[in-house]
Amino acid sequence: MSNSINKLNKGVVLAELGGYTDGGFCAVHGKDSALVMLGTYIVSSSKIDYPDNFVFRPGRNNFFSYLKDNILEARKSGASVGVSVVSIDKRHNLDFLSAAQEAGADYVSYCAHSTMKIFLETNTSSALLQRMNWADLEKLTKKILKRITIPVIFKIGAFDNPDIADAIERAIFLCNALAFFTIFTLTLLYLSISSAGTVIIFLKSLSLTV
């Protein structure tokens, strides 16, 4: 895990932007970056107001080939490659992250930053960081860390809700990951979307003790 973080130290991250950051975009615009992020993708069985090519129906067969091809394409940037996803169904998040890992991603990310209505109404994504939803956040975190062996990122908007700081502290405690907590200054491309910045938590995948 420390090697994974060292590779990103003082590097530029081409952050995910739904509708844009697929493999081809990252290959061109991510050159000389430390990390390029594909996504954020949404897994949903219903229609969502989001770029169509970044929405997948549940089921590994619906996205594995896409992930494999786009991760391979993104590697032309010379950077490490991460994949970001969010879904209202925890099982779909796990299936997608697992597929991304199997398809060759160096990092996977759960987007705990979206304020889209569908996620706020179902207490998922950014709503998971509200104190009343911490039990669900812990359950999801445990399941991810039991299934994923590459570094995991939780993407969090620094001021999405007033419980953010305490949620981060709780996540670090839960994952025994204090040594792997870091904050990146991301590219202007990302900061134009999240002017408050983003907190990224690297979770220790192999030594979860809960």
Image (tube, rainbow, N blue to C red):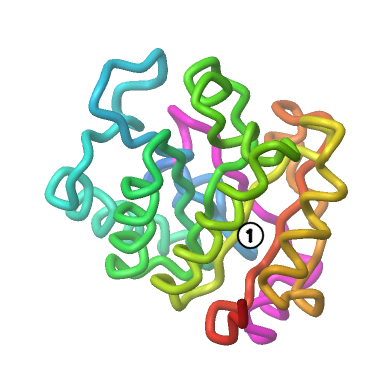
**In the structure shown, which secondary structural element does the residue marked by tag 1 occupy?**
loop
Q: Is residue 156 left or right of residue 10?
A: left
Over which residues does the magenta segment extend? 1-21
Instruction: Determine the image quadrant of residue 1.
Output: bottom right
Q: Residue at x 61, y 77 (%)?
A: 210
Residue holding disc 1: 33
Q: Is residue 167 left or right of residue 46?
A: right
**In the image, residue 2 lies in the stretch drawn in magenta:** yes
**In the image, residue 34 lies in the stretch drawn in magenta:** no
- On the image, the x and y values in percent for residue 126 come to 64, 34
- On the image, the x and y values in percent for residue 79 come to 54, 65
Instruction: Determine the image quadrant of residue 113.
Output: top right
Q: Residue at x 63, y 59 (%)?
A: 33
- On the image, the x and y values in percent for residue 10 come to 81, 67
Q: Is the residue 22 above or below the residue 11 in the image?
A: above
**Disc 1: CA contacts within 10 A as few (<14), some (14-19) or many (>=20):** some
Q: Nearer the viewer, residue 69 or 57?
A: 57
Given the image, on which type of amino acid does mark 1 rest? Ser
- On the image, the x and y values in percent for residue 152 come to 55, 65
Q: Nearer the viewer, residue 102 or 92?
A: 92
Q: Nearer the viewer, residue 67 or 131?
A: 131
Q: Residue at x 45, y 53 (%)?
A: 83
Whether residue 79 can be seen here: no
Q: Nearer the viewer, residue 1 or 7?
A: 1
Q: Is residue 102 left or right of residue 59?
A: right
Q: Is the residue 98 above or below the residue 13 in the image?
A: below
